[in-house]
Image: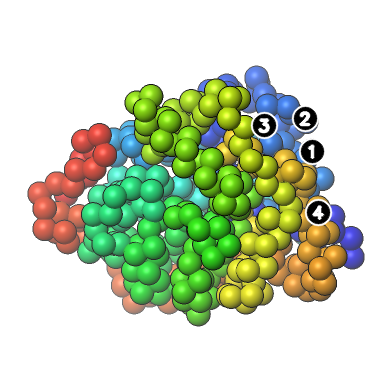
Amino acid sequence: MTRTSVPVIDGHNDLAWELRRQVGYDLDRIDVGRRQTSTATDLPRLREGGVAGQFWSVYAPSNLPGDLAVTQTLEQVDFIYRLVGRYAGDLTLARTADDVEAAMTSGRIASLLGAEGGQSIGCSLGALRVLHGLGLRYLTLTHNDNTPWADSATDTAVHGGLSRFGVEVVREMNRLGVLVDLSHVSVDTMRAALVASEAPVIFSHSCAQAVTDVVRNVPDDVLLSMAAGGGVCMVAFVPEFLTEEAAAWRAEAVAHAAGDGISASDFPRFMAWSVGYARAHPKPLATVDDVVRHVEHVRDVAGIEHVGLGGDYDGTDTMPVGLEDVSAYPRLLDALDERGWSDDDLAKLAHRNAIRVLRDAESVARDLSALRAPSLATIGELDGIPAAVGKDNTVCPV
């Protein structure tokens, strides 16, 4: 088996937001059916990389007022629908594990939706259900800011993990079959969600904290709990998560940005600001070997059934040397092959674990939906407050 013949299902790609930023979603201005120079993702390189399935991130900044975050998430969903429609010979929308396998058989790339941050539902379980109906198959509980019901890894904790409404969000996600994604959340939120969830959870784009000690990475005890529940940690290719040197660079950049009045939690502004900072202060490089260290650590702690890939292409400013764009997955698989990984284990890492966790979540949802009706709970009822006020005076409905 050649590495290019191993299909990859990747957990996180930010092309939708990047094309909003570059061209306002106008696919007449950037034809991703052709090789591009301003993005890390296009169809020719997805094909070269052996990508058979992609969770497309439908992201809205976490410091937006709730209603605007919901609107921007819907715009992201609309873009993915238009992307799939324009390139229907190469892409197909997937809602189930069976859909993914059918796409792989047909030779088209399965396109799944994942919302990056609980701000995307605006504290509304009804909004969660609508997004599920549109095809949402994971929700990251936070992005860089807390939501009014969950703590982020990169914000000041206020909930001790999940509020009572946050637990109800997890329960409703389980009932629907929306995977609980614990990338970006605080360790307390990880642990609380693992207790609350009746279905396997995922990390769509995270690395191992024991290898690189940053708050965005996953501690070993959480990896063990995640695996015990049948989950998958999809390892990201973000240099700041992969090496201590790049992590230190990021910490220094955050401090300098704050001096310029820019918060790192305002991700779009911070990323734009960091372009100039990186010219004067080049970011330390990461390599394929750094990704290998994290992949093998997750495998060694959690087991081969519980590790996957979530590159985060087009969601960060630099990628490791050798993994610069979505064509590069075979280089990582080659490196693991050289270290003695079997064909079966490479297939589990690359796609089988992702399909299995999706199918397991579907099975749980079938059982739970037969036992309980859609939740009508509100954050006001469960958290005992008349309204939930978040970042920038975000007000959630009660």
Q: First in sequence, mark 2 or 3: give its number.
A: 2
Residue with the mark numbered 3: 39
Which of the marked residues, 2 or 1, is nearer the chain's N terminus?
Answer: 2
Residue lying farthest to the right in this orientation: 1
Q: Earlier in the sequence, mark 4 or mark 2?
A: 2
Residue type at tag 1: Pro
Residue at the location (78% across, 64% down)?
336
| Residue pointed to by mark 1 | 44
Q: Are marks 1 and 4 in contact (CB under 8 Å)?
A: no
Residue appearing at x 71%, y 60% in the figure: 292
Q: Is residue 266 left or right of residue 124?
A: right
Packing grade of label 1 (10 A; few <14, some 14-19, many >=20) is some
Tell me which amino acid carries mark 4. Pro
Q: Quadrant of residue 189?
A: bottom left
Between 13 and 153, the residue placed more toward the observer is 153
Give the residue displayed 73% in from the left and 27% down from the top: 37
Residue type, mark 2 in image? Arg
Observer able to see residue 133:
no
Mark identifier at residue 34: 2
Q: Secondary structure at mark 2?
A: loop
Which residue lies under the disc numbered 4? 330
Distance from label 3 to label 1 (Cα)? Answer: 12 Å
Neighbor class of circle 4 (other Cα within 10 Å; few <14, some 14-19, many 20+) is many
